[in-house]
Amino acid sequence: MSPKQTYFGYTTTQQRKLLFEEREATGSVTKACQRARVSRGVYYYWKPRFDEYGYAGLEEFGSRVAHKLNRKEEAIEQQAIELRRKNPDWGKTRISQEMAKANNWVPVVSPNTVRRILTEAGLWPESGSDKKKENRKPQDEQLSNLGKRST
C-alpha cells in the first residue's frame, strides 16, 4: 500500500492566525478548524512552525520562493548559439542532436530548451505559424475556386 499523499491548499495569513487563536481560546482543534474553514491536516501542517516561531511563523510561506529554474550552463547556451550561427538552416532538433553527438550521444539539452536559448538570443524566428496564416486564402475564396474548371 502506498503512503497517502495529502494536498494542503493555500491558506491566508488571517486564516492561520484565526486557526491558532481559536485553538487557544476553545482548546479544541476541531472547532478551531471549523471556524477557520480548514482541515485538521492544515492545522497539523502548520503546528510545528507555530510551536517554533509563534504567530510570526504563520506569516511567511517559504515554499512560494522561486524554485530552481531549468537553466543550462553558460557554455551549453553558447554552444547552441554558435551552432545556430554557423548553420542557420538547422532547427532545434538538429542542434540538440549535434550537441548530443559531441557528448558521446548522451543528451545535453532538449530541443525545446534549444529553442528557448535561441529565442532569448534573438536567433529564432518570432512565430512560424504567422507565415502560414499570411499565405492562406480566406475560406470563401477557396470554396468559390473549387467550382471553377481550369482550361
Image: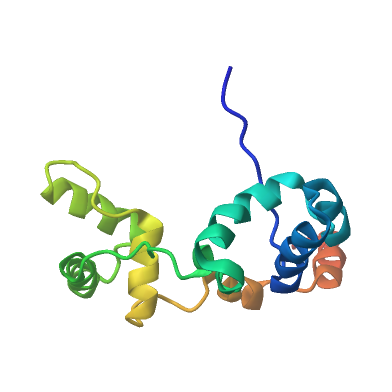
Assign the C terminus to one quadrant of the image: bottom right
Seen at 82% across and 72% down, the residue is: 141
Residue 28 appears left or right of 80: right
| Residue displayed at 69% across by 61% down | 10
Q: Which quadrant of the figure has residue 80?
A: bottom left
Q: Is residue 100 left or right of residue 109?
A: left
Q: Would you say 73 lies left or right of 39 here? A: left
Q: In this view, does 49 lie above or below 136?
A: above
Location of residue 19 (image quadrant): bottom right
Residue extending furthest toward the top: 1
The image quadrant of residue 121 is bottom left
Name which residue lies at 74% across and 46% down: 40
- Which residue is pictured at 81% across the width and 53% down the height? 33
Q: Is 148 displayed left or right of 5 in the figure?
A: right
User: Is residue 149 shown above or below 6?
Assistant: below
Across and down, in percent, residue 144 comes to 87, 67
Q: Which residue is at the front of the view, 85 or 136? A: 85
Location of residue 86 in the rendering, given as x and y in whole percent from the top left corner = 17, 72
In the rendered image of this protein, does residue 64 appear above or below residue 2?
below
Please name whichever residue, 70 or 133, is drawn nearer the observer in this view of the structure. Answer: 70
